[in-house]
Amino acid sequence: MARKHDHKGGDSLGPSQRQLRVAEEVRHALSAVFAREEFRDPDLHDLHVTVTEVRASPDLKHMTAFVSGLGRDLTKEQFAGLRRVSPFLRKQVAHAVRLKYAPDLHFQPDTALDYAMKIDAVLKRPEVQRDLAPRTETED
């Protein structure tokens, strides 16, 4: 099947296999750095971070890492700390992942779990349960 391209030359079918592979390698590299807790920044002291996903730009020069704290959301100060240490993280990723260019790293909160919990709560509402229950022939 031929890949479709949008008017800007990008892929309209989503990320390429290379983008997905490199993003996953970057996720592993970042996770390893966060596990070592090598930060001197006071806002990142005792920070426990999970890197849930990394998305790569088509040219692989920018990576957006979706992160969450273990048991609680990251604060604005902690995201500011991540921005301050991004040159260090960029260097660590460059050593771990072989790329032509070391990617710029951007951090975003991972809201997927919050969203899933909201959907679960909606599905448990009595009016939704009633609508989802199988109908019998006598009800039709």
Image (spheres, rainbow, N blue to C red):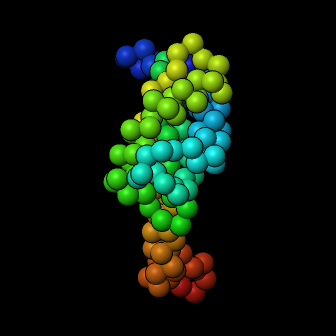
Residue at the image point whose x is 57% and y is 12% from the top: 100
Above or below 19: residue 110: below
Residue 96, percent from left and from top: 66, 27
Quadrant occupied by the N terminus: top right
User: Count the marks: how many?
Assistant: 0
Quarter of image, res 138: bottom right
Q: Is residue 111 visible?
A: yes
In the displayed structure image, the side of residue 70 where residue 118 appears, left or right:
left
Residue 4, percent from left and from top: 51, 20
Viewer-proximal residue among 124 and 37:
37
Residue 18, percent from left and from top: 62, 23
Residue 40, percent from left and from top: 48, 44
In the displayed structure image, the side of residue 24 where residue 41 appears, left or right:
left
Residue at the image point whose x is 48% and y is 54% from the top: 45
Viewer-proximal residue among 43 and 110:
43
Residue at the image point whose x is 45% and y is 29% from the top: 87
Viewer-proximal residue among 4 and 110:
110
Q: Is residue 31 visible?
A: no
In the displayed structure image, the side of residue 81 where residue 40 appears, left or right:
right
